[in-house]
Image (spheres, helix red, strand yellow):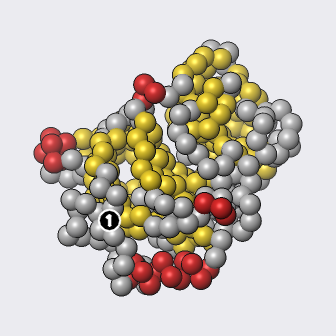
Amino acid sequence: MSITPATDPSCSSCPTTPSIASIVDAKARDVGGFKVGRLLPAAAQRFVGPFAFFDHMGPNEFAPGAGLDVRPHPHIGLATITYLFEGEITHRDSLGSHQAIRPGDINWMTAGRGIVHSERTSPVLRESGSRIHGLQLWVALPLAHEETAPEFHHHPAGTLPALEREGARIRVLAGTAYGETSPVHTFSPLFYVDVAMPAGGTLPIPGAYEERAAYVVEGAIGCGAEHATPGRMLVFTSGGEVTLRADSDSRIVLLGGAPLDGKRHVWWNFVSSSRERIEQAKRDWQEQRFPQVTGDEVELIPLPE
């Protein structure tokens, strides 16, 4: 996805449970002609572990003739993770990748020193109309890998570990959690987990990571005195045990990891430890020095003013 430079939604309430460091509510943003809910970056919580960006897409209905049109745009210094609950997105990038993303798959695109990609609804679905519902996250790369060669990896749904714990159905999308490790290659210790919890169920949050958060996709959960409904993220303090309870049948995602190894600057679609590197990326995009997206060379998103 492409974002605008103004990405500072604030923490919308003060936590009353000691194990919760902050509470962040989604703020509406326009992406490719439809609204998303943005959680990260926020003024009160810019990162959770290496996760620098969190968008909840939909659920959105596209009428016949309409669809998602995120035109070609660049990234540096990060990896994008796309995960769908419903619908389909056609991914293309400057490495020549052309991949349909469907529910349950993980698309991991490492930008490193620079990549360009687009995300669109296919002509077939555009003709019939479609729905889209999913998440896109960015992971900031460690200092040693900020300028790594760009890569693209697609992981079909069936390749990701699935398990049950205390009645909860868990899928480990990236990293390691609950004794399972995803096949997705990551550059730093992290976890990203999709969980379906039955009403009345409880689930401990993985405790091996310093920074952790839970986001409600559907339903309602509680943690101590706090409650969260769709569009709310609970960010937990480091250390100690945290247990979530489901106040109704719920779908949540859990994420976190080791803190970043130093300060990161975020501007538009660029993440870097160096402001000068971001300025260079701006010039490179404006002067068309980034590579083109194979099969989607006509349009692009201009550099924001």
The residue depicted at 63 percent of the width and 26 percent of the height is 180
The residue depicted at 86 percent of the width and 36 percent of the height is 240
Which x, y percent locates residue 198? 59, 19
Q: Front-most of 225 and 98?
A: 98
Which x, y percent locates residue 17? 82, 41
Which x, y percent locates residue 275? 62, 80
**Quadrant (top left, top right, bottom left, bottom right) of the C terminus:** bottom left
What amino acid type is highlighted by mark number 1? Answer: Pro
The residue depicted at 53 percent of the width and 39 percent of the height is 184
Question: Can you identify the residue that label 1 sits on?
Answer: 72
Disc 1 crowd, CA 10 A, few/some/many (<14, 14-19, 20+) = many
Q: Front-most of 250 and 113?
A: 113
198 vs 304, left or right, is: right
**Quadrant (top left, top right, bottom left, bottom right) of the N terminus:** bottom left
232 vs 261, left or right, is: left
The reply to whether residue 52 is visible in this rendering is no
Q: Front-most of 301 and 56?
A: 301
Which x, y percent locates residue 4? 47, 70
Classify 206 as above or below 92: above
216 vs 117, left or right, is: right
Classify 88 as above or below 288: above
Using the rendered view, name the quadrant where residue 291 is placed. Answer: bottom left
